[in-house]
Image: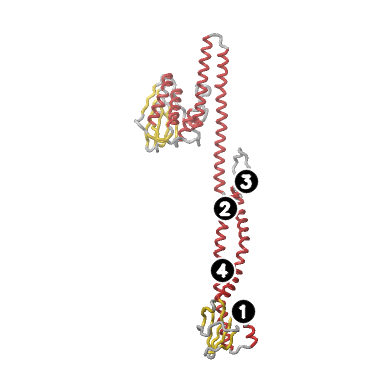
Amino acid sequence: MNIVGSLRLRVFAFLLALASVAALGVAGATYASVRAETDTLFDYHLQQMALSLRDQGDIPEEERVALRDPNLHYVVQIWSLDGLEIYSSEPAPLLPPRAVVGLSTTQVGGEVWRVFSAVTPRSVVQVGQPVAVRRTLATSAAGRSVLPIVVAAPLVALAMWWLVGASLRPLSRVVQAVSERQPDALRPLSAQGLPSELQPLVESFNLLLLRLDEAFGAQRAFVADAAHELRSPLTALKLQIGLLRDAGDEAERQDAERRLRAGVDRAAHLVEQLLALARAEPGAGAARRPADLSAIAREAVADASALAAERGATVVLDAPAALPLAGDAQALRSLLRNLLDNALLYAGPSPQVRVSVKTQGAEAVALVDDNGPGIPPAERERMFDRFHRREPGQGSGSGLGLAIVRAIARQHGGTVALLDAPGGGLRAQVTLPTGV
């Protein structure tokens, strides 16, 4: 059973339960009302019969015969004021000669009777009826009044089943349209003809499809770019392996081994950056643990000390003793290390790099300043694109460093921007929330 069928069954079950309770309530009220009305009607008949006999005087023979009919379920007795029997519709009097004027309930021979007594100047007229007979007739009349409800109940249930199905038909169309789609069909669903209750659902689903389409597009572009970037180092490794194999003397072999080791290092670094970027992609999630940005900055500077020595650079760290925040310490360390590597590699000869960590309101700010040529403002936003280089073919970078930095910053709810450094050069500014 699909989701629409299950929903239809649940809604129908709830409506059927509600309708059943309502029908039972109506039937019960109708049954009780009809019984009460019937009882009142029987009392009225007793009264009218007694009064008509009182006003009539003598009872003709044909009426005597009619009153003896057992199907009437009535007993008529007439007494003189002295207590002598004048007339009885039964062979022997059943009702007591002393009676309460008007309506009364009395017990005769272990059976309860309903009696109406009327007094004339010459006699007392009594008309009685067994209560059991009254109840039987009243129950029969009440049952006949409830019968239409019982007959209509299945028809109402069928109508409710059809109405629920008709109401859920637009949802069924949406479910069918989604289920029949191919995995790569991300075009929006049509909201035409849908009720207003379903339109927000379809619009939200279309927004999700749009985000998925953008994510898949970015993923396809990333895979294509990664394949293109990996092709060059792998081709270079194959070439270096060939040179190592064909080396004519020990000097050529050592040079080929050095080149091969450098190529492997570049390929390993590219793979590490690709993995770091994948871990920082939207949806990957960041570990929200207490961390210390000052300690992370000190570790990143220590990690970059070898590259700084190789480049003849000076790296200065300005950070408080501790700067607590919530985040993934390893990812934030990778963020600062990528900014440091960029500053050391592209700041020109004798780089001067300054790393500053501070608080600014409810945010933590990390600054990496260098004394290099900087980047024109018009080009700064493009530097965050994957595999983008200002001068393709030059340098050993893969063009992923700043893309990783932005992805990690966004993963932590922060931002990154490229600005002019106060002393000239480029400043990379990362702003992160400090909430733990």
Which structural element holds mark 3? helix
Mark 3 neighbour class, 10 Å CA radius: few under 14, some 14 to 19, many 20 or more: few
- Residue kind at label 1, given as amino acid type: Leu
Q: State the residue in front, 414 or 20.
A: 20
Contact check, label 4 and label 1, Cβ < 8 Å: no
- Residue kind at label 3, given as amino acid type: Gln
Q: Which mark is residue 31?
A: 4
Q: Residue at x 56, y 56 (%)?
A: 14
Which is more foreground, mark 2 or mark 3? 2
Q: State the residue in front, 203 or 238.
A: 238
Residue 383 in view (yes/no): no
Q: State the residue in front, 124 or 422.
A: 124
Quadrant location of the C terminus? top left
Which structural element holds mark 4? helix
Q: Which residue is mark 3?
A: 176
Identify the image quadrant of residue 124.
bottom right
Which structural element holds mark 2? helix
- Give the image location of residue 169, x and y in percent: 61, 51
- Give the image location of residue 149, x and y in percent: 60, 65
- Residue kind at label 4, given as amino acid type: Tyr
- Real-space CA distance between mark 2 and mark 3, rounded to the nearest whole angstrom: 20 Å
- Real-space CA distance between mark 4 and mark 1, rounded to the nearest whole angstrom: 24 Å
Q: Which residue is mark 2?
A: 10
Q: Residue at x 51, y 80 (%)?
A: 104
- Residue kind at label 2, given as amino acid type: Arg
- Real-space CA distance between mark 4 and mark 3, rounded to the nearest whole angstrom: 48 Å
Mark positioned earlier in the residue sequence (2 or 1): 2
- Give the image location of residue 157, x and y in percent: 61, 59
Q: State the residue in front, 359 or 259.
A: 259
- Give the image location of residue 130, x and y in percent: 56, 77
- Real-space CA distance between mark 1 and mark 3, rounded to the nearest whole angstrom: 68 Å
Mark positioned earlier in the residue sequence (2 or 4): 2
